[in-house]
């Protein structure tokens, strides 16, 4: 599902991507990549959202936008919540777009080093 | 002080300082007066009338131009020579150390009288490096090393490494030079470097310490220190070595000195009744789980754990304090399996509470949340030798966990009895059910391996290079060698343990113990030294922050020809700390200030980037980097492996993903 920039947490949380007037426009994966770094997502999830022991894999195929947003805003797990004051809805939408843009990796069976 | 009196009373007529001063004066006079000149002067007879300018006498001329006679400034047998005799009765092969005046006498005896063998002095550039080397060396060889350091400034440098050894249950014999005699020791710097009780600095995290006041006392202390350090639970020990005691000669009329014979102690074992009760619980369990941390220290320890696990068909969670259980074995499972356990046996766990509980650093007002991970009626069994040496100040004993069957004792030593007790306790009608349990675990293990490989494929071609790629490119070049992963500091998402087929006890050595950063580099060099002597290939995953604590150990490796492949996990930051600052920023609804870096101010190691390859090259290593393109990594590691096989250390500076 494509994620779109929306104004307002309710719309964001619902993943509707609708502007108040009913319009919508696509969030920017390019801006999202920068926001992903700026807000420290890379620290636990890696620059390509691959995850590791400190954070789950976010990409490819990120979870649904609604669940993604709810988690970022209200995490009670190891990740601290990111309130809107420090991570705007715009940035969050862009980050989601960036995660959506990350392509699937090659099947591990096609990587010789992972089949020794 | 009683100990001062004890040293002085038998020989009040010999003051060390006066004795040395007298010998020094006499020696100086004698040294410039060759015997031949004396004789010549005596033969000249009566003096003629004295001219206004006298030519030099033969005595003066000889004194000014002749070769000084070589005379010992200190007569008798050096006390520190005897100390070397004591040390040589024990199996101590190396002595990594940074030189210091407070142990100059024993230093001299070791390299001259002792021939610099057993132990061989290894020049270190930092005391923390010296102790770290001893730490790594033991985990490969099973043999302790000793180190010498200034009792004050040197021991303060060494303290962090001693704490790591304490928490990691590793024996190191730390000997600190100290000049106790305040009235006679040199003023100024040597007095700055003296203290009443140097061992107080490390007493909270050493098993034992002593301050010998006579040579015979030294012999008893040193052999006792060795014995205590090498009896499970292992741990560092400290000896304060008085400079005066080292320098004085053995008194001619003193009591006859002897060297106590070292006989190793049997390791403590779990109580027989408790072993039977543990076996009863395990044999009757539906979902038993074995959790191990520092349980196996030898090949036999690994074999015993396999025997117990197969007997029960119980999954084994290896927390990685040592290479306890083969990663290739189908019973090797991730920590999640404890959630459904009805009986858990933990062996040499450093944090039992942390195994069965979760702590999430995300509660209200910055207070973390606690949650039990196990069912309320799960029975807990423990075998741990560390229960025998719990101290008060430092909190390495972790949170208190109630245990149903607790056995203070060494796990590896207790395993044979436990295995036999379990074998006896399993009813014959349970054997089919146990076998069936094993089949289910085998299937889960295979599926887990597949998932792990697929996860490793994520970001495979990324730059900076993914930690999975880093680890597997390294593996591809060493897999046909008798390899030993000597350290993996920094966080590479545990990829070596998840992907490498670790089966032998020396293929993974665990971590620092106390999580004091700076362990990886020196421990790698020490472990590589032991592996060199055993003909094994050493590889480390070397993180950037760790290396910068005391990089001089690279020089020690080159100087003493210790082959080691260091593949850097250079993520250009202190990533353990990055998220802490980010977390607090979030809790306080403030945007983290990054400055001009990627992480919050104070947590990055960039601007400028450190050229670790040049750093290593400057200290005699073969090195290459920075490597940012994953396609270049494999060929570079291949080159480095060839260098290491030729006997040199090699380092690759690889830019990596954060974790």
Image (cartoon, coloured by chain):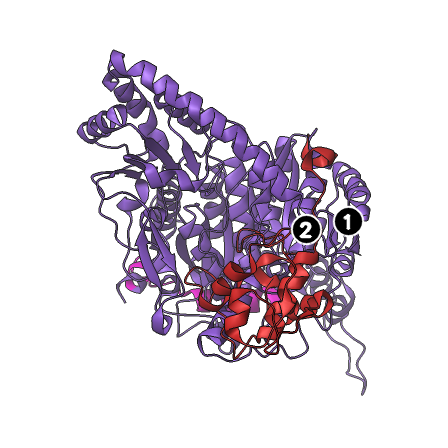
Chain colours: A red, B purple
Q: Count numbered badges in the picture.
A: 2
Q: The C terminus of chain B lies in which quarter of the figure? A: bottom right
Closest to the observer: B257 or A73? Answer: A73
Q: In this view, does A41 lie above or below B590?
A: above
Query: Is mark 2 in CB contact (under 8 Å) with mark 1?
Result: yes
Residue at image location 34% in from the left, 30% down from the top: B413
Please name the predominant secondary structure of the magenta segment in the image.
Answer: helix
Marker disc for residue B180: none
User: Is residue B16 magenta-colored?
Assistant: yes
User: Is residue B152 magenta-colored?
Assistant: no
Marker disc for residue B630: 1
Q: The N terminus of chain B lies in which quarter of the figure? A: bottom left
Q: Mark 1 lies on which chain?
A: B
Residue B341 point in image, percent of width and height: 32, 36
For disc 2, the marked residue is B466
Q: Residues within 10 Å of mark 1 (few under 14, many from 20)?
A: many
Whether residue B560 is visible, yes or no, is no
Q: How crowded is mark 2: few (under 14 residues within 10 Å), some or many (20 or more)?
A: many
Relative placement, left or right, of B450 versus B439 is right
Relative placement, left or right, of B16 versus B224 is right
Residue A31 point in image, percent of width and height: 71, 70
Residue at image location 48% in from the left, 77% down from the top: B187
Give the magenta part as a residue range: B5-29
Q: Mark 2 lies on which chain?
A: B
Q: Earlier in the sequence, mark 2 or mark 1?
A: 2
């Amino acid at each position: 599902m494509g994620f779109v920039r929306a104004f307002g947490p309710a719309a964001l949380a619902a993943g509707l991507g609708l502007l108040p007037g009913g319009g919508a426009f696509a969030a920017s994966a390019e801006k999202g990549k920068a926001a992903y770094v700026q807000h420290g997502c890379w620290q636990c999830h890696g620059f390509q959202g691959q995850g590791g022991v400190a954070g789950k894999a976010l990409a490819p195929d990120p979870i649904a936008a609604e669940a993604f947003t709810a988690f970022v805003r209200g995490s009670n797990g190891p990740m601290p919540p990111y309130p809107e004051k420090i991570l705007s809805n715009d940035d969050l939408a862009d980050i989601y777009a960036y995660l959506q843009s990350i392509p699937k990796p090659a099947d591990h069976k096609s990587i010789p080093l992972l089949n020794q | 002080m009683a100990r001062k009196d004890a040293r002085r009373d038998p020989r009040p007529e010999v003051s060390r300082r006066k004795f040395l001063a007298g010998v020094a004066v006499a020696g100086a006079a004698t040294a410039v007066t060759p015997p031949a000149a004396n004789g010549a002067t005596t033969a000249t007879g009566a003096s003629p009338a004295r001219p206004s300018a006298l030519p030099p006498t033969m005595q003066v001329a000889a004194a000014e131009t002749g070769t000084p006679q070589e005379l010992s400034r200190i007569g008798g047998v050096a006390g520190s020579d005897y100390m070397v005799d004591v040390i040589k009765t024990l199996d101590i092969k190396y002595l990594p150390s940074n030189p210091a005046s407070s142990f100059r006498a024993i230093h001299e005896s070791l390299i001259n009288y002792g021939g610099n063998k057993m132990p061989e002095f290894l020049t270190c550039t930092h005391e923390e490096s010296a102790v770290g080397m001893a730490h790594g060396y033991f985990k490969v060889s099973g043999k302790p090393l000793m180190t010498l350091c200034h009792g004050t400034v040197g021991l303060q440098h060494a303290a962090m490494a001693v704490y790591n050894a304490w928490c990691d249950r590793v024996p190191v014999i730390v000997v600190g030079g100290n000049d106790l005699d305040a009235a006679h020791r040199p003023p100024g710097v040597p007095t700055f470097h003296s203290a009443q009780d140097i061992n107080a600095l490390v007493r909270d995290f050493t098993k034992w310490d002593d301050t010998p006041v006579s040579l015979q006392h030294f012999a008893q202390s040193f052999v006792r220190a060795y014995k205590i350090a090498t009896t499970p639970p292992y741990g560092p020990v400290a000896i304060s070595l008085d400079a005066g005691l080292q320098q004085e000669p053995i008194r001619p009329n003193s009591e006859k000195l002897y060297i106590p014979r070292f006989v190793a102690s049997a390791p403590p074992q779990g109580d027989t009744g408790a072993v039977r009760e543990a076996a009863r619980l395990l044999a009757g369990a539906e979902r038993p789980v074995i959790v191990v941390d520092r349980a196996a220290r030898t090949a036999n320890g690994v074999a015993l754990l396999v025997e117990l696990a197969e007997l029960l068909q119980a999954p084994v969670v290896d927390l990685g304090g040592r290479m306890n259980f083969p990663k290739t074995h189908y019973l090797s499972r991730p920590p999640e399996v404890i959630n459904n356990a009805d009986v858990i046996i933990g062996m040499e766990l450093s944090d039992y509470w942390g195994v069965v509980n979760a702590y999430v650093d995300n509660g209200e007002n910055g207070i973390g949340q606690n949650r039990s991970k196990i069912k309320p009626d799960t029975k807990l069994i423990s075998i741990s030798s560390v229960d025998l040496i719990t101290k008060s100040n430092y909190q390495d004993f972790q949170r208190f966990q109630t245990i149903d069957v607790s056995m203070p004792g060494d796990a590896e030593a207790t395993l044979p009895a436990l295995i036999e007790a379990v074998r006896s306790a399993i009813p014959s009608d349970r054997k089919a059910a146990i076998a069936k349990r094993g089949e289910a675990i085998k299937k889960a293990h295979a599926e887990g391996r597949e998932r792990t490989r697929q996860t490793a494929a994520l970001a495979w071609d990324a730059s900076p290079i993914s930690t999975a790629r880093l680890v597997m490119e390294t593996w591809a070049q060493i897999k046909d060698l008798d390899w030993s992963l000597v350290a993996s500091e920094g966080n590479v998402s545990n990829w070596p343990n998840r992907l490498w087929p670790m089966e032998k006890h020396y293929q993974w050595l665990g971590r620092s113990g106390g999580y004091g950063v700076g362990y990886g580099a020196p421990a790698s060099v020490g472990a590589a030294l032991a592996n060199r002597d055993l003909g094994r290939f050493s590889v480390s995953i070397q993180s950037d922050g760790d290396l910068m604590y005391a990089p001089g150990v690279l020089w020690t490796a080159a100087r003493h020809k210790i082959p080691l492949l260091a593949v850097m996990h250079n993520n250009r930051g202190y990533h353990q700390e990055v998220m802490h600052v980010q977390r607090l920023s979030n809790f306080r609804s403030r945007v983290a200030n990054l400055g001009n870096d990627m992480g919050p101010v104070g947590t990055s190691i960039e601007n400028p980037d450190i050229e670790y390859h040049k750093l290593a090259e400057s200290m005699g290593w073969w090195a290459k980097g920075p490597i940012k393109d994953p396609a270049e990594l494999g060929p570079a590691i291949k080159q480095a492996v060839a260098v290491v096989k030729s006997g040199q250390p090699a380092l690759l500076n690889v830019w990596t993903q954060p974790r």
